[in-house]
Amino acid sequence: MNIPTEPVNAVNGTVNNRARILNAHPSDMNTPPGPVNAKAGPVNTDPRPVNTSRSGGAEGGEGGKKQSAAVRLVALARERYTFVMSTDGRPYAVAIDGPNLALPLRGRAGLRQRLARLYADTFEGDVASQSALADAMTVLEGIADSGDPVPVHLRVGNDESGRIVVDLGTADGRAVTVSGADGWHVVDRSPVLFRRSGAMAPMPAPVLEGDGLARLHGLLNMDETTFRQLVAWLVAAWIPTIPHPVLTFKGEQGTGKSKTAQMVVNLIDPSPASKRSQPRDIKAWSAQAFNSWALCLDNISTIPPWLSDTLCKAVTGDGIVDRALYTDDDVVVLSFRRVLAMTTIDAGALAGDLAERLLMLDLQLIEEDRRRTEEELDGAFEAARPAVLGALFDLLACVLATLPTVRLDSMPRMADFARVLAAIDQVQDWQTLDAYLTASANVAGDALEGDPFGTAVAALVEHAGTWTGTAAQLLEQLQPPGGIRPPNWPKDATRASGKVKRLAPLLRSIGITVDDTQRSRDRHRSRLLVLTRTDPDETASAPQDQTLWPDVTPPGSGHMPSDQY
């Protein structure tokens, strides 16, 4: 069929008589090209700023440029806080018009959380992002690092004049200052910088009301000698510059060990978790020790070697170094000296080094007609606590006034604590130092009996009088009890030599000296162990029986500093 062919693209391109627009620009496609954006004015000349929809922003800089959220956060923080770096390398913020408390920059209840809320309150309708907060924290850490490190204390510290300062843990930042010259006072603002932790609880303000020590004694099932040693330990626990022995409550079931330990710790450093379980590793322990001045390990049956060594170091002062998070070579240092307590049934489970750092207090079985409910004890303790604290601070002030004149004829292992006992004996006319030395000798004997190898060495020397030989010969001559080697029995001569050295203080307490300075005369020049039996000092094995809950000497009946209230 000869159908007429319709032209394609006849008018700017048509198909089926319908025009299809290819170029809607009024100019012809073949028009000579002209310049793009031929207007003489600059590009993007609109004077309006970017992000004008965000409310609450403050203008800054030239041309009305808005400040970033991180810049505003830093400005808010610097208006209200100063920034310091602690001696262990941690940055803190201190409120300019607030209590003398160090806030960590990060973490729960730290500056980051407070700053985020302050930003939202200041710039209504705007919330700081996580990246802005992180940038601000980095800047503030740099500001803190620009100055010299300052000491930051936990619960207890001392100022430049030597006064002891105890943080009451209240929101207003009140503290108690104690000195030998001025006594004790409750102050509205602490003279030293304290930090807080979630493991701390507030402490009631101390008061002078009756016989506080007698009220405390009425809550505990101890004889007078034991109670006086406890009072001495409580007073020494607020002296931060000395090592403190591990307060250990020992007794059978039903003697109130756990409850007694709880009340004692809540006098020194109140906590919602005053009793703790045995930590599983060194990291768990360091987290607990870093956040509490006083800790109590409850119901200890056996102590692994690593924990025994760790507790010994915590008594005299410990430092733990760990890699910082999100870094390859930076480290975090945790340094502390702590006041420790624990409860146990068997003292023989304690290692030798730890046994020398214990203050062992035996608790008596509570008779059924003297038992009290937990609710009744808690109520009585809370009612008596302000008066007990007042009496203890009274006694602490007297001890601080007496300490400079105290001189000991001989220095025992915990010499600083022994000087505090001697000062208390002078103030109160007690005999706590003699009781402590006697109890320490008994604890050493108990710990030695709990070590099969040490018991075998003591039996050998007891039989021979003096024994000389190498560590290999000693290990060969000693036989394990029942012929079965216990887990802690040395496996070779090197371990046997080290074991004897660690047992030397315990052996010395029962009259056996250890000398490892001599060598054999043959060509091998082997190191010799010389074990010699001597006559130990005659000491009483236990204090005389005394009645429980006796009358207690009122606090401050000794030499009370004048004008201390």
Image (cartoon, rainbow, N blue to C red):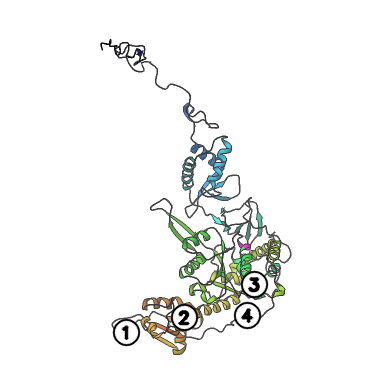
Question: Residue 142 at x, y = what percent?
Answer: 46, 45
Alpha-carbon span between mark 3 and mark 4 = 13 Å
Q: Looking at this rendering, what residue extends furthest in the left direction?
A: 2
- Secondary structure under tag 3 reads helix
What secondary structure do most residues of the magenta stretch adopt? loop
Mark 1 sits on what residue? Answer: 521
Q: Which residues are magenta?
A: 266-279
Mark 3 sits on what residue? Answer: 228
Mark 4 sits on what residue? Answer: 543
Q: Looking at this rendering, what residue extends furthest in the front direction?
A: 1
Q: Report the amino acid beneath label 4.
A: Pro
- Which one is closest to the eye, mark 4 or mark 1? 4
Alpha-carbon span between mark 3 and mark 1 = 54 Å
- Secondary structure under tag 1 reads loop
Label 1 neighbour load within 10 Å: few <14, some 14-19, many 20+: few
Disc 4, disc 1: CB below 8 Å? no
196 in magenta = no
Disc 2, disc 3: CB below 8 Å? no
Q: Is residue 203 visible?
A: yes
- Secondary structure under tag 2 reads helix
Disc 4, disc 2: CB below 8 Å? no
Question: Residue 8 at x, y = what percent?
Answer: 29, 13
Alpha-carbon span between mark 2 and mark 1 = 31 Å
Q: Report the amino acid beneath label 1.
A: Arg
- Which residue does the image show at 47% across and 68% down from the upper left? 309
Q: Is residue 550 visible?
A: no
